[in-house]
Image: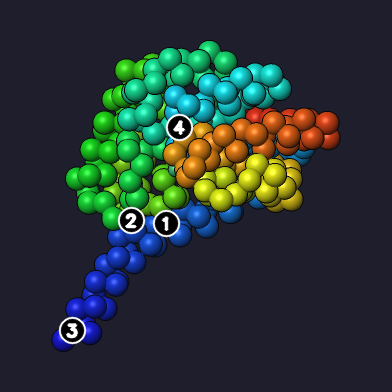
């Protein structure tokens, strides 16, 4: 009896969140093969905006004339409207990364609905037309799938991570991972907020090294809009 109960719970968890998550990851891999553009990278930043780091990151991107895509946490965006305005003014694309960065695997239908509703209201108030969505940790549940459809959002996952959120990594390690792991046409996921022990400061330092190297090799930097529109 107890074993049956455990099996039913496991099947429900699989159906509710694990299967939708894997379907999106698999789809991303498939799509990725057709949409790659030679000699280009798509820089994306999650978990901001943050008062401490996002402005320095925007300065660096401006210095190197690089456009990027920011997947912002709507509650952080609400607290930092001037940073959102600057992102728009400087030609970056702004996508959504949930209302408060909770993991969809454990959220109810009601929570998921409110997450999207509140986020879209905030982004609307900030004058951002949201077309792209990246869920925290790349996790979905069945309700996320419906909400994405309802708001007509395009889901964007990633090809490369450099574990830049870790507390014990260094900017050198992040830079090396970026160089070693990124192939032409890849979507690169970094972070301008959250993370451990001032993590985004190491991300920005690493990019300060890597951007000139990539630019020197002739790479172009595109946004998800260039890729999906
Ligand atoms: Zn995140």
Which one is earlier in the sequence, the residue at label 4 or at label 3? Answer: 3
**Disc 2 + disc 1, Cβ < 8 Å:** yes
Residue beneath the point at 76% across and 39% down: 38
Residue picked out by circle 1: 21
| Number of marks drawn | 4
How crowded is the residue under tag 2: few (<14 C-alpha within 10 Å), some, or many (20+)? many
Q: Is residue 98 visible?
A: yes
- Of the numbered discs in the image, which one, if any, rests on residue 180? none
Residue picked out by circle 2: 105
Residue beneath the point at 64% across and 23% down: 60
Residue picked out by circle 4: 48
Q: Quadrant of ligand 1?
A: top left
Which one is earlier in the sequence, the residue at label 2 or at label 3? Answer: 3
Residue beneath the point at 67% across and 48% down: 173
- Of 35 and 184, the residue lying toward us: 184
> Circle 3 — which element?
helix
Camera-near label (4 vs 3) is 4
């Amino acid at each position: 009896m107890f074993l049956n109960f455990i099996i039913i719970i496991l099947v429900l968890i699989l159906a509710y969140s694990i299967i939708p998550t894997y379907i999106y990851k698999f789809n991303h891999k498939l799509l990725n093969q057709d949409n790659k553009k030679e000699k280009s990278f798509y820089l994306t930043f999650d978990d901001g905006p943050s008062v401490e780091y996002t402005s320095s990151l925007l300065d660096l991107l401006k210095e190197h004339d690089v456009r990027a895509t920011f997947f912002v946490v709507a509650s952080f965006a609400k607290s930092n409207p001037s940073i959102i305005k600057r992102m728009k003014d400087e030609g970056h694309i702004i996508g959504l990364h949930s209302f408060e960065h909770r993991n969809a695997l454990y959220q109810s239908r009601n929570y998921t609905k409110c997450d999207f509703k509140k986020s879209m209201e905030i982004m609307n108030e900030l004058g951002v037309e949201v077309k792209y969505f990246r869920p925290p940790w790349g996790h979905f549940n069945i309700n996320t799938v419906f909400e994405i459809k309802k708001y007509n959002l395009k889901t964007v996952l990633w090809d490369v991570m450099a574990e830049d959120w870790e507390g014990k990594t260094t900017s050198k390690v992040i830079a090396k991972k970026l160089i070693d792991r990124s192939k032409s046409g890849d979507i690169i996921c970094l972070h301008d907020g959250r993370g451990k022990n001032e993590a985004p400061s190491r991300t920005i330092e690493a990019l300060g090294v890597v951007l000139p190297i990539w630019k020197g090799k002739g790479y172009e930097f595109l946004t998800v809009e260039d890729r999906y529109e």
